[in-house]
Image (cartoon, rainbow, N blue to C red):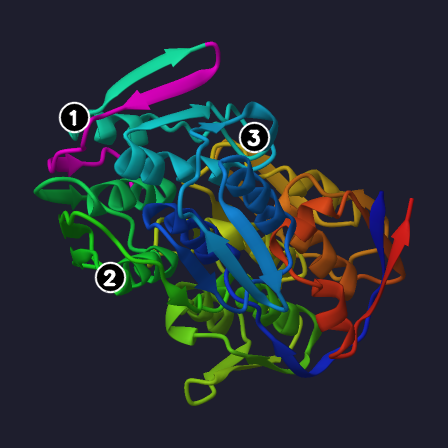
Amino acid sequence: MDALRIEGGYPLRGTAHVSPAKNAVLPLMAAALLAPGESRLSRVPNLADVRTLSKLLGHLGARIAREGSSLRIDAADPAGREAPYDLVKTMRASVLVLGPLVARFGQARVSLPGGCAIGARPINLHLKGLEAMGAEVRLEHGYVDVRADRLQGARLVLDLVTVTGTENLVMAAALAKGTTVIENAAREPEVVDLIECLNSMGARIQGAGTAFLEIQGVDALRPYDYEPIPDRIEAGTLLVAAALCGGELKVEGARINHLDALVQKLREAGAEVEDDGGRGAWARGRPPARSVDARTSPYPGFPTDMQAQFMALMALGRGLSVVTETIFENRFMHVSELNRMGADIQAEGARAVVRGVRRLSGARVMATDLRASAALVLAGLAAEGTTVVSRVYHLDRGYESLETKLNGVGAKIERIKE
């Protein structure tokens, strides 16, 4: 099993390039099922989650071919309709095939994803929306079986903001008969990216980037040739790294307008963050940071996927900060690992009280989920001595060669076998 050995204490200087967004690529891959023929997705990051979804699409009968950084998905006539447990259990985003399969073929059988490290994240809103569009939904033996001769347009009011739920229902509605309205839709840039791709395929969707979507169903869609947006979470992780370690870092490809809430908090904490004329962002860190509070919320609020990394910054802050998690009920598992490094963090319920300390000490720590692993890497960069982060397969799910990018700007990280 791989681990990362990190020698802390080095400032970061230079340019790091942001990969395309994992959370945009996965729904775009699923969207290829909506159209007969070959779709092409360019600049696809080499990530474990991408490989998992590629396996699932292949299991369904699509032909997948990787050419350099491009991915070709031929969904001319996939025969499969079932997403099995062995694949869904490793990546919850596998449920994104549900909407496209029902919309195009009238049937899907998808394993219920169950719980995961950061919370239950049920798919009841996906199923409720499909039922409102005329689908028959049955739950049996750990699977959800959804059937519909053809989905019908409907008015869907989502009880909670759900990113994958919005994406699944938008893809389903694109081929439904009539008009579908989705209220309380997710507004994340990755949702907007999916909608822009669907419209390039011939869909008729209005309201991208707002909480109110209107989808005029069409009879058929055509394959796409599309490039996904840069990964705002990877960009945010690199900006936090600069604030934590000091130095001056250019994050090439970052779209700062996708990171407004995080950038505001970094500036409050004393870091300088500037837009590089639309080509990326500059960050200059002056540790120690000032302690500031953060509260996660759906986009455009502070992203839950940046909570753990920001907490690593606050662990070395001047003063006391309170980090509140409102999206997932179990996303503080990195707290105990940061405390092993000398942090002073008390978590109770949805709140974590962070009392900044003068230094962190390198230690052996264990990653518990994707963003927790990134937070531990950042903490290791700022700690005194050597930190070893185990279980970095979590990191590899969502960051493409993060240690290589950080080493390129002055970090000292080595991938080792345990």
Residue 226 vs 16, above or below: the answer is above
User: Given the image, on which type of amino acid does mark 1 rest?
Assistant: Gly
Distance (Cα) linking label 1 and label 2: 24 Å
Rendered image: mark on residue 134: 1
Q: CA distance from mark 1 to mark 3?
A: 30 Å
Q: Which numbered disc flags the more N-terminal residue, 1 or 2?
A: 1
Residue ranking furthest to the top: 141
First to last magenta residue range? 141-161
- The residue under label 2 is 199
Please identify the residue farthest to the left as the structure is shown: 178
Above/below status of 200 relative to 65: below
The reply to whether residue 293 is visible in this rendering is no
**Which residue is label 3 attached to?**
116
Q: Nearer the viewer, residue 273 or 405?
A: 405
Residue 369, horizontal then vertical, whole percent: 64, 41
Q: Amino acid at mark 3?
A: Cys
SS at mark 3 in the image: loop
State how many labels appear.
Answer: 3
Residue at 24% over, 26% down: 128
Q: Residues within 10 Å of mark 3 (few under 14, many from 20)?
A: some
Q: Position of residue 271 (x, y in %)?
A: 55, 76
